[in-house]
């Protein structure tokens, strides 16, 4: 990998917690944080994926199996981080789902419950339970989505959950101003992750839809997880020390023009 021009050590001696850290954007961000000097605690539902992530990252990473929508699992995650490191400096509330598509007429209770249970309820408690372990000057990053501002047919439930995430970043910026803890929303556009493999589509259907979507992106391509990770690094580091309450779009210009 080309490293010229990069500065390392921006998260030296920091402790980060990343939910949904065993694949995709979460894994890429964990790798990037570790490269910058942080110790990272990652959580995910599947032990196999977590073990593979730890092997890939190679150092300064601790995996704690669990579901970010379950409060007891979040308690175990933070207990482990406190036991090993005594504090948390950065939280990336990244875990979420968005693979259930349905137009308005077909939305079900189960779809609403499952989506909001993780994307909103789980995210709220991911942050709330971190607060006793965070010191002044910490950074909280919420994974939102460009879907929150762009009307996409069949994705209204997912989009509504991500609009809630963006709203939470604003409110929590006010709630935590006395502790100098920054809260920002990170909104990726279409990104090459495995989540799209879980859609109930054939490969041909997926490639057709992907081509249509790509034509709407000024950069003419989907993002890579490492590109989202770079934005997360900026929001986690002191380089964004006077930034809070924003929504940072990383989308190749898709919702900007």
Image: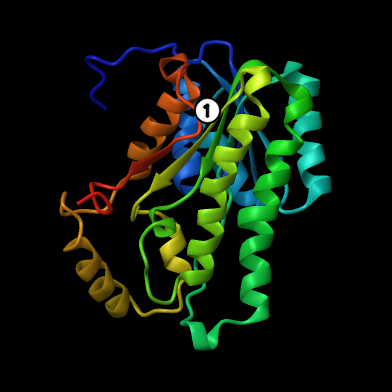
Tell me where residue 154 sits by quadrant. bottom left
Task: Indicate the quadrant where residue 52 lies.
Answer: top right
Residue in front for this viewpoint, 88 or 144: 144
Q: Residue at x 51, y 45 (%)?
A: 143
Q: Nearer the viewer, residue 191 or 241?
A: 241
What secondary structure is found at the residue carrying circle 1?
loop
Image position of 55 with respect to 201: above or below:
above
Image location (x, y in percent) of residue 115: 61, 65
Looking at the image, is 96 positioned above or below residue 240? below
Query: Is residue 65 at least partly visible in the picture?
Result: no
The residue that label 1 is drawn on is: 58
Q: How many marks?
A: 1
Residue located 38% across and 54% down the image: 146
Is 233 left or right of 137, judged from the image as shown? left
37 horizontally vs 207: left or right: right
> Relative to the observer, which residue lies in front, 11 or 35?
11
| Residue located at (45% from left, 48% from top) | 24
Q: x, y percentage for residue 176?
A: 66, 27
Q: Is residue 119 left or right of residue 162?
A: right
Residue 217 in the image, given as x and y percentages of width and height: 20, 56
């Amino acid at each position: 990998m080309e490293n010229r021009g990069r500065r390392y050590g921006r998260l030296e001696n920091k402790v980060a917690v990343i939910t949904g850290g065993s694949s995709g954007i979460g894994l890429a961000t964990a790798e990037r944080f570790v490269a910058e000097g942080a110790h990272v605690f990652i959580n995910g539902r599947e032990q196999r994926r977590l073990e593979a992530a730890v092997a890939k990252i190679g150092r300064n990473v601790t995996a704690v199996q669990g579901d970010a929508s379950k409060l007891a699992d979040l308690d175990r995650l933070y207990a482990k981080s406190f036991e090993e490191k005594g504090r948390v400096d950065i939280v990336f509330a990244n875990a979420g789902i968005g693979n259930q598509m349905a137009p308005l007429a077909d939305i079900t209770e189960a779809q609403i419950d499952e989506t909001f249970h993780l994307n909103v309820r789980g995210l709220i408690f991911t942050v709330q339970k971190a607060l006793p372990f965070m010191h002044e000057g910490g950074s909280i990053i919420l994974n939102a989505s460009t879907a929150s501002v762009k009307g996409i047919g069949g994705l209204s439930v997912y989009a509504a959950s991500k609009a809630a995430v963006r709203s939470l970043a604003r409110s929590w910026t006010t709630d935590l101003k006395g502790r100098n803890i920054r809260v920002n929303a990170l909104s990726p556009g279409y990104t090459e992750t495995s989540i799209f493999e879980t859609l109930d589509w054939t490969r041909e259907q997926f490639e057709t839809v992907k081509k249509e979507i790509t034509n709407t992106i000024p950069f003419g391509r989907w993002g890579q997880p490492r590109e989202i990770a770079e934005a997360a690094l900026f929001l986690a580091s002191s380089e964004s020390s006077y930034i809070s309450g924003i929504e940072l779009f990383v989308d190749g210009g898709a919702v900007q023009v």
